[in-house]
Image (spheres, grey):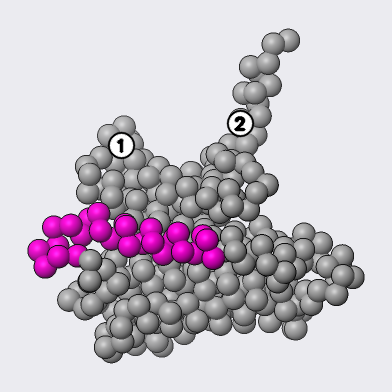
Amino acid sequence: MSMIALFGALETGLIYALVALGVYISFRILDFPDLTADGSFPLGGAVAAVCIVNGVNPWLACGVAVIAGALAGMLTAWMHVSLKILQLLAGILVMVALYSVNLRIMGSPNVPLIGEASVYSGFVGDDFASQYWIQPLVILGFVIAAKFLMDWFFSTQTGLAMRATGANARMARAQGVSTNKMVILGMALSNGLIALGGALFVQTQGGADISIGIGTIVIGLAAVIIGETLIPSKKFLLITISVVIGAVLYRLFIALALGSDTLRSMGFGPQDLNLVTALLVVLALRFPQIKSYFKKVGKPS
């Protein structure tokens, strides 16, 4: 793998680290199987792209994207807590609806951003020679900020109430916690982070496309599972680190797999990205059992 390809994989991995942090909030903290991510990721990208094309500051465009994603998450949560729609179905309904919403926002299936300002513009030189390593650094700044804000928030009274809601909603209600509000707030935070990832993604790729959200939830889940498997911990500080590392490693695995001469000789190519993704997720899901098996085999009888 070339240096540019390595930095490219790192860049994409860091963007999906934001997605993974968002997915962690919904799936692990709230115990809410949420498929809204496949719609809120391109929603963040669409909102940011349209804002930038219309002259809005790219940093402000990212903020608007976060708000849009948060609203999508709140809608999913509201459908569940108020309309009593099953969690999974609520996420699917919002995800499907967002496809049309995203098309409405963009006005076409894609919005080019070539030549437009981005959050990287102030850091990359006119010759773009440093672009391949500057962009990952800027995204890393976003990831670090999101990680520490999550660590702080979930150590506050509200954050602890949210964690209690996901762990045991009935007990949380008995302690006076408004569990419905916690679910809505948590889903807003989750999808806000995912939308931020989408906003950074379109600025990295040079354009927004209606199809960029396909498989987002699978990538986020895979990152969470890989991170938890490699760095098992009960401390929230380490958990968020493990999720970020899981996302980066996942994208590196994908890049290595698609760049493998062995796989290429077997007929695999870029068109098989989703297939390789699915296989890696299966391996990630089975990894804890495989690890346990080898531990048992390795023990002296």
Is residue 299 a member of the stretch shown in magenta? no
x%, y% of residue 181?
72, 79
List the single residue furthest toward the top.
301
Q: Name the residue under label 1.
A: 260
Q: Is mark 1 on a helix, strand or loop?
A: loop
Q: Mark 2 points at which residue?
A: 290
Left or right of 73, for residue 273: left
Residue 38 vertical position relative to residue 253 in the rendered view, above or below:
below
Residue 222 vertical position relative to residue 213 in the rendered view, above or below:
above
x%, y% of residue 275?
43, 49
Magenta-highlighted residues: 124-149
The answer to which of 106 and 68 lies nearer the viewer is: 68
Left or right of 221, for residue 126: left
The answer for how far apart the CA atoms under marks 1 and 2 are is: 24 Å
Predominant SS of the magenta segment:
helix
Q: N-terminal of the two: label 1 or label 2?
A: 1
